[in-house]
Amino acid sequence: NAGVTQTPKFQVLKTGQSMTLQCAQDMNHNSMYWYRQDPGMGLRLIYYSASEGTTDKGEVPNGYNVSRLNKREFSLRLESAAPSQTSVYFCASSESIYRDSYNEQFFGPGTRLTVL
Amino acid sequence: EDQVTQSPEALRLQEGESSSLNCSYTVSGLRGLFWYRQDPGKGPEFLFTLYSAGEEKEKERLKATLTKKESFLHITAPKPEDSATYLCAVQAPGTYKYIFGTGTRLKVLA
């Protein structure tokens, strides 16, 4: 099993460009998440999908959109990149079926994005 | 507001020098606290889940404990390969969301 995979690993964009970060998991998990990690800020939730067909905003959703393409795949789109979106982006998945399932998350290797 | 605070921010230990990392939380009705290890340039790796006060879990040189207000990650006789950032997280009750602390960067010197 590959677990959680993310593409690309690295990306440099110019301000105003768009791009989509891809995430896939092969653990048959129900819930998927997108986080960004910045120095001193910890992991902050951008969007999550509790199950196939649903998406919800997290702590810092502005400037991002997501698509839960199917149970395996969850993509994050930056429509018009800004320097403030320079960060490391992590996708995660969890078996969680219910709101209080308290299942651990499994993380991908991350995408390092720089916006000039 | 639900919050998770970790201390210290950074910790340097000599090989074999035991210590503890702290994770305090302000979440009502906590039913799950998670510890992760993160190596530079990689995603967090799951270590432990603790569900109730008094629970303890061990893995090699690591032992995690939980009280009603905080969790400790005890590192016994650490080795250089234990160097990493250790993150703790809680699941916000009644939601699918997880709240992470900012982590403790551990450096173990040979």
Image (tube, coloured by chain):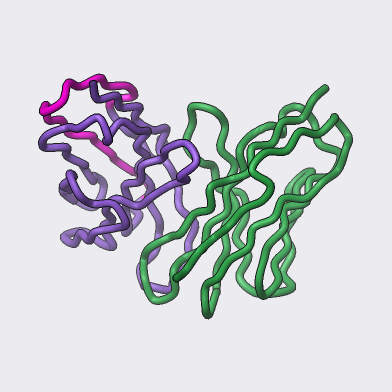
Chain colours: A purple, B green
- Asked whether B31 or A101 is in front, the reply is B31
Residue span colored magenta: A8-27
Quadrant in which residue B71 is drawn:
bottom right
For this orientation, the residue located farthest to the bottom is B29
Number of numbered discs visible in the structure rendering: 0
- Report which quarter residue B103 is drawn in: top right
In the visual, does B14 lie left or right of B87? right
In which quadrant of the rendered image does the C terminus of chain A lie?
top left
Q: Residue at x 24, y 25 (%)?
A: A115
Left or right, A73 with respect to B16, comes to left
Residue plotted at (46% across, 59% down): B99
Quarter of the image with the N terminus of chain A is top left
Say if the magenta span includes residue A16: yes
Q: Residue B97 at what x, y percent from top left?
A: 38, 63
Q: Is residue B10 left or right of residue A61?
A: right
Q: Which residue is found at the position 88% from the left and 37% from the top?
A: B17
| Horizontal and vertical percent position of residue A84 | 27, 35
Residue B93 x, y percent position in the rendering: 44, 74
Compared with A111, B26 (above or below) is: below
Image location (x, y in percent) of residue A82: 20, 32
Indicate yes or no whether the magenta region holds residue A74.
no
Q: Is residue B62 above or below residue B13?
A: below
Q: What residue is shown at x 68% (from left), y 47% (from top)? A: B8
